Image (cartoon, rainbow, N blue to C red):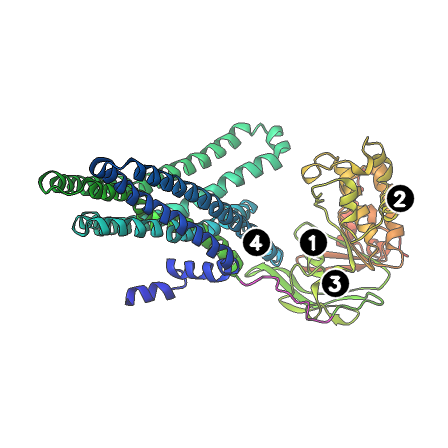
């Protein structure tokens, strides 16, 4: 009892996990489970009654010679089989619907939890891991509950009913059947630890298959360009071989209970045949009693074998359930902060005051950074890669919070306001353009909830995307493909710009937003930006300095600090870092016309 109590209370114990799944997820379907349990009871009772009646048929046929009684018993037997079939069918449908509902709820629950996580949470994980948890983990929870219900409602009730028939017919002979239980339980317990270990490795290896598939398909251009087909095939084959080996090992270990049960069952049946035959032949016992006992014993064999394997199967399924719950139970890295006051924007004056931040310990990215982006003006961030420019935009979007210092807009500390109220007032175009599944219209409309057709078309025209969109046979209904594969890089970029334009937000963040455009398209889009940024606070990151020459302020970011700031002309006169960058870029080219003009 002490060991049972400990395993029930242990947070990672099997019994504790089952109790949690039953109370948290199974309890809301208790009426359906109760109906299914009752139907399984009908099925179990019909099975036991059939075993009992077959003995009566033997006696009526060979002892009483009563054909009419046989007809009645045959009709009753037929009714029992029909009742068993109907009860099994309805119960199976009910349990399947419950299982599907539990899987769907857990998938919603896991996805909702992932939406509360920060960017840092995903940085060291592969998306295939979450896909595996979303599919395999959610299904494992339903499997655990289904195994418990079937074990109790189908197998246990059937076994109890059949044992009752056996005991009713011959209590002493029933002992032969019960003798197989202790050695079976002892050996099964030895298998559980091994099953749990293999299941953990199998679950992780399955994620590697998804990972290899995702990377090969999403990077198919790189795969083809660098002739990496053989390497991708090698990686996929290795992952598949690992899962295959784990699956084979799992099958071997889980199946070890079958020969054990077969051997023990054979011994018990042989003993029962000898003893029953002795009673009928030597003691003149009624053959129906022996036949009924033997039928009940043989029918009890399958549910007994399933119950013996239950612990093994439960532990295999609980690995997946734990994988899902590990994510669901972990505290959100970007917790709900809707209770905080909403950010109220007026002038949209942005200030970084002595801000420090590092992705990894002892590797600062922003080092006491301080600057002010004036309201209604264009502030450009330039400098070498890795200096912290993109991190500044990420912190303005509150993908990360500062580890020291304060970021404020209109005097309001961003950390003390809700994230949603901030992000709702930002139009963002990043250097990595992401297209969602669907068509062009839907991808533009994602910028604004409830965007009208006129707003979508106006935004596309302003982004100089309307003409190429209308050149497609389906126009705005053209599918973009996975990650926008049906569009060119420049087309994807202009659709993303249209998505930002339709939002019509007071704060604009542009991270190399024209990097994928040719010179002609870039000039057109820059004119659209001039309209977009008018009277709006804008922060733009640019490596091509000709695009930000007429910005109101240019900040040179290097080593996590602002090393220079001023207008284009002022910085050239200083002949510092900016002047060096500018000369390097324009050494063999003539500057293009400025693009983003100050309001």
Q: Secondary structure at mark 2?
A: loop
Q: Position of residue 586 (x, y in %)?
A: 80, 42
Residue 346 picture location, percent across and down: 84, 68
Q: Going 62% across and 59% down the picture, which residue do you hit?
A: 116
Q: Earlier in the sequence, mark 4 or mark 3?
A: 4
Nearer the camera: disc 4 or disc 3: 4
Residue toward you, 102 or 538 = 102
Q: State which region is magenta.
A: 331-341
Q: In the image, is residue 470 part of the stretch drawn in magenta?
A: no
Asked whether 255 or 533 is in front, the reply is 255
- Earlier sequence position, callout 1 versus callout 2: 1
Q: Residue drawn at (45%, 46%), measured in percent from left and top?
A: 87
Residue designated by label 3: 422
Q: Dot 3, how many residues are within 10 Å of its Cα: few (below 14), some (14-19), or many (20+)?
A: some
Check the picture and name the quadrant holding the N terminus. bottom left
Q: Say the numbered circle drawn on residue 593.
A: 2
Residues at marks 4 and 3, CA–CA distance in whole angstroms: 30 Å
Q: Is residue 391 above or below residue 522?
A: below
Give the image location of residue 413, x and y in percent. Answer: 72, 70
Q: CA distance from mark 3 to mark 2?
A: 33 Å
Instruction: Determine the CA span between mark 3 and mark 1.
Output: 18 Å
10 Å crowding of disc 4: few (<14), some (14-19), many (20+): some
Number of the label disc, if any, that sits on residue 105: 4
Q: Are marks 4 and 3 in contact (CB under 8 Å)?
A: no
User: Label 2 vs label 4: CA separation?
Assistant: 55 Å
Mark seen at residue 470: none
The residue to which callout 1 is attached is 390
């Amino acid at each position: 009892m002490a060991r049972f109590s400990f395993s029930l209370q242990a947070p990672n114990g099997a019994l504790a996990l089952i109790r949690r799944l039953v109370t948290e997820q199974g309890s809301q379907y208790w009426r359906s489970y109760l109906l299914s349990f009752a139907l399984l009871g009908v099925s179990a009772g019909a099975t036991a009654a059939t075993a009992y009646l077959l003995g009566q048929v033997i006696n009526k046929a060979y002892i009483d010679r009563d054909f009419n009684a046989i007809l009645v018993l045959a009709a009753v037997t037929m009714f029992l089989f029909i009742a068993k079939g109907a009860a099994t069918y309805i119960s199976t449908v009910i349990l399947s619907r419950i299982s599907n509902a539990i899987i769907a709820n857990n998938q919603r629950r896991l996805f909702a939890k992932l939406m509360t996580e920060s960017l840092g949470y995903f940085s060291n994980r592969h998306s295939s891991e979450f896909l595996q948890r979303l599919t395999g983990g959610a299904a494992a929870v339903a499997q655990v509950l289904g195994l418990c219900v079937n074990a109790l409602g189908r197998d246990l009730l059937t076994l109890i009913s059949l044992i009752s028939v056996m005991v009713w017919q011959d209590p002493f002979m029933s002992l032969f059947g019960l003798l197989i239980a202790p050695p079976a339980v002892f050996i099964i317990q030895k298998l559980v630890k091994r099953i749990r270990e293999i299941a953990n490795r199998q679950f992780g290896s399955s994620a590697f298959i998804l990972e290899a598939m995702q990377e090969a398909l999403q990077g198919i251009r790189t795969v083809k360009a660098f002739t990496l087909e053989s390497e991708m095939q090698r990686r996929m084959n290795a992952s598949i071989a690992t899962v295959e080996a784990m699956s084979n090992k799992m099958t071997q270990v889980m199946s070890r209970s079958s020969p054990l049960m077969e051997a023990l069952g054979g011994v018990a049946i042989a003993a029962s045949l000898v003893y029953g035959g002795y009673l009928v032949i030597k003691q003149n016992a009624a053959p129906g009693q022996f036949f009924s006992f033997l039928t009940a014993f043989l029918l009890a064999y399958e549910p007994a074998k399933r119950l013996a394997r239950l612990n093994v199967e439960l532990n295999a399924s609980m690995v997946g359930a734990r994988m899902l719950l590990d994510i669901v139970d972990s505290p959100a890295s970007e917790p709900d902060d809707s209770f905080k006051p909403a950010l109220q924007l007026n002038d949209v004056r942005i200030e970084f005051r002595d801000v420090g931040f590092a992705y990894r310990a002892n590797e600062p990215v922003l080092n006491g950074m301080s600057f002010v982006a004036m309201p209604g003006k264009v502030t450009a961030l330039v400098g070498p890669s890795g200096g912290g420019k993109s991190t500044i935009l990420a912190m303005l979007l509150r993908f990360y919070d500062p580890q020291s210092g304060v970021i404020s807009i209109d005097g309001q500390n961003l950390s003390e306001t809700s994230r949603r109220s901030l992000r709702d007032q930002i139009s963002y175009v990043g250097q990595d353009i992401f297209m969602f599944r669907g068509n062009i219209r839907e991808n533009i409309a994602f910028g604004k909830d409830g965007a009208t057709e006129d707003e979508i078309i106006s935004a596309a025209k302003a982004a100089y995307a309307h003409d190429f969109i209308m050149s497609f046979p389906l126009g705005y209904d053209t599918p973009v493909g996975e990650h926008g594969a049906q569009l060119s890089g420049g087309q994807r970029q202009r659709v993303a710009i249209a998505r930002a334009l339709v939002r019509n937000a007071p704060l604009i963040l542009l991270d190399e937003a024209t990097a994928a455009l040719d010179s002609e398209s870039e000039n057109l889009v820059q004119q659209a930006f001039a309209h977009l940024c008018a009277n709006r606070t804008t922060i733009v990151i640019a490596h091509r300095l000709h695009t930000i020459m007429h910005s109101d302020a240019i900040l040179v970011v290097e080593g996590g600090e602002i090393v220079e700031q001023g207008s284009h002309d002022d910085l050239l006169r200083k002949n510092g870092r900016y002047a060096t960058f500018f000369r390097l870029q324009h050494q063999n080219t003539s500057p293009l016309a400025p693009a983003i003009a100050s309001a």
